[in-house]
Amino acid sequence: MKKYIEGFLKLVVSLGIGIGIVYWFVGQMSDAEKQEVMADIRRANYLWVIVPVVVGLISNYFRSQRWRLLLKPLGYSPGLFNTFFSVMIMYFLNLFFPRLGEVSRCGVLSRYENVPMDKAIGTMVLERVVDVLCLGIIGSFLFIFETDKFLHLKDMVVAKSAETAAKYQINPTTKYGVMAGVLILVFAFWAYRVKKQGFKVLNAQVKDRVAGLFNGLISIKDIGRPWEFVFHTCMIWVCYFLMGYLGFFMFPETAKLPMVAALMCLAFSAFAFSLTPGGLGLYPIFMQLIVGVYGVTGSAAISYGWVSWSAQTASVLIGGVISLVLLAIFNREPSLKEVSPKT
């Protein structure tokens, strides 16, 4: 009976988080923005709204496989489903608190696959470094071959970012209150551990955790199949590119945009997602500016950004809630078997 009650509570919490984030997202939008999104969704070609979402899910599969590849040299082989769920939950939680998802996905594998948190975080940081390098390559390509458009867009994006980001940022009082609360809890936990275990023992544990983090960071050097890592990385970014390019076909006005326009969308969308939770507010504006530079103006330019953002956000919200629920169902009892790391 206790197990069923725990499972039920996990489902309630998971659904509650999802409903809460949806409510928060909708609350951040003005009435005009809500009406605009609904009007755009009604006139879009639904096939090309759904296909990019499916491609986005495929990109998460490749990201999951790449992460498993990095963990294998450390002696851990997490299951594909739990790894995929953790990636979905990462994007889900990032909608509310940027960067919270990265730590959370490591926590999922630590909880359900016995992967030490420090090593999981190390491999996650390594993944982010690789992704930044890939984004830098795309940016360099655009700067070299689309110089005028790239620089023009950069100036417009910088001008729009400050005013829009300020509108959609999380309330500073809430943000700093949460940060202060976390710091107080960390300090209290540290003081308790020092009192209970002694400074020397705790110091040795910290050194061990730092070593695990470092091992995660350098795990790429021990990958037995480096070309598989390159393949998964390339496929992640190919999927990201296809999400933008295939999305052009949702409206007749954007259907004839060149492929390089999708690359431009990819480069600047990363910037939007880094400034506001889920790119809220900024992503549609950036997309409108980009397709405008390539000749699409009027309602179609506005529609493309809003429908793309709405579809991606809806898929992350729905996928995140489903992943939380399935994680609770598939892992009613976390595995007690720990795989010993290779020496």
Image (tube, helix red, strand yellow):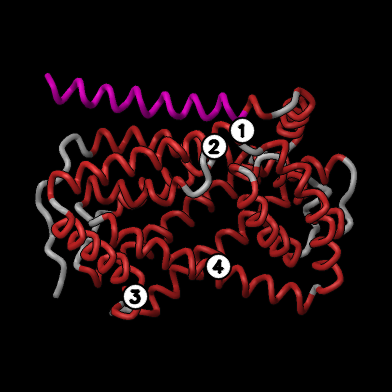
Badge 1 marks a residue whose secondary structure is loop
Q: Distance between the residues labelled 3 and 2?
A: 33 Å
Residue 184 quadrant: top left
Tell me if mark 2 has few (under 14), some (14-19) or many (20+) residues whose alpha carbon lies within 10 angstroms of its own: few
Residue occupied by mark 1: 171
Which residue lies under the disc numbered 3? 218
Q: In which quarter of the image is the N terminus?
A: top left
Which span is picked out in magenta?
A: 1-25
Of pointers 4 and 3, the one earlier in the residue sequence:
4
- Whichever of callouts 1 and 3 sits on the residue coming sooner in the sequence is 1
Dot 1 surroundings within 10 Å: few (below 14), some, or many (20 or more)? few
Task: Provide residue 257's location: percent of width, then percent of height.
Answer: 79, 59
The answer to whether any part of residue 69 appears in the image is no
Name the chief secondary structure element in magenta: helix
Q: Name which residue lies at 28% across and 22% down.
A: 9
User: For mark 2, what is the residue?
Assistant: 175
Look at the numbered disc 3 and give the secondary structure of its residue: loop
**Disc 2, disc 1: CB below 8 Å?**
yes
Label 4 secondary element: helix
Please report whichever mark, 1 or 4, sits nearer to the chain's N-terminal start. Answer: 4
Q: In this view, does 298 lie to the left or right of 130?
A: right
Is residue 22 a member of the stretch shown in magenta? yes
